[in-house]
Image (tube, rainbow, N blue to C red):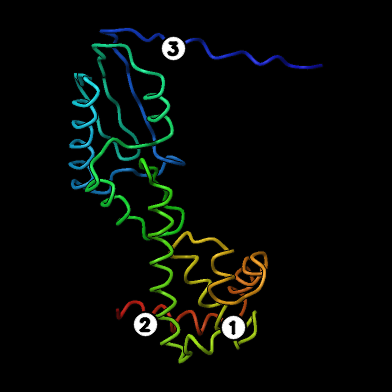
Amino acid sequence: MSVAQVPRKDRVEYGEALYHVMDPGNRLEAIFCDDRDREVFLKTRGEASERCGWRVHCYVLMGNHYHLLLETPEAIEEGMLKALRRGRCFGSEEFQEALVEKMGKKDASVHTNNGSAIKRTHDEQEAERLIAIGLKALGISAVDLPKHPKGSAEKIALASVARQRTSVTNAWLAERLSMGAATRVSQYCGEAAGRSDIQKFAKKIEMAIGEN
């Protein structure tokens, strides 16, 4: 028996409308870590309101979500709503750079107007920095790195640290560290926790990173 999908009701969009806007963090994780985050959010909300002509009558900022009571003097354009639903921000370049700066851990995700490219570039640059520190700590030169076996403990340690601290792809790591196919990187890193030799090298790399 097939089940028919019920379409969403048309959204009421007209001038002088009032909307209750609520937006939670991904997986209900915190979106405000401190007062600085709240200040940046309110500043950017003001920029968006001024740009779009919205009036915010009241708001509540919670740890992992926020509420807005929003009035739209004119009907909202559908394209603008799509941009909001996809998480794109209206903030200045300074705001976008501040977000990117916070994204030091894997799975941190933000979509600015050109956020995907910014995020990818940021993570690749950070991974390059971590790998350079790691190679120095392990006493391996960039020239000698390709000569090591694809699944050497040193390479797996480097890849594991980079994966934990950034969101670079397995394909990027496979090419950068000369580890063969991208699928092998995932397999190697999955074995890291159970191998004392890899853990020893990873700890050495982490200590070197902490000193830089």
Left of 17 or right of it: where is 196? Answer: right
Q: Please say if 176 is above or below 35.
A: below
Mark 1 in CB contact with mark 2 (< 8 angstroms): no
Residues 104 and 53: in front is 53
Give the x, y percent position of residue 66.
Answer: 30, 31
Residue at which label 1 appears: 153
Q: Nearer the viewer, mark 1 or mark 3?
A: 3
Q: Mark 3 Cα within 10 Å, few/some/many (few <14, many 20+)?
A: few
* Mark identifier at residue 119: none
Task: Give me the residue at 41% from left, 79% from top.
Answer: 132
Which is nearer the N-term, disc 1 or disc 2? 1
Residue at which label 2 appears: 208
Give the x, y percent position of residue 97.
Answer: 27, 52
Left of 9 or right of it: where is 97? Answer: left
Q: Mark 2 Cα within 10 Å, few/some/many (few <14, many 20+)?
A: some
**Amino acid under disc 2:** Ala
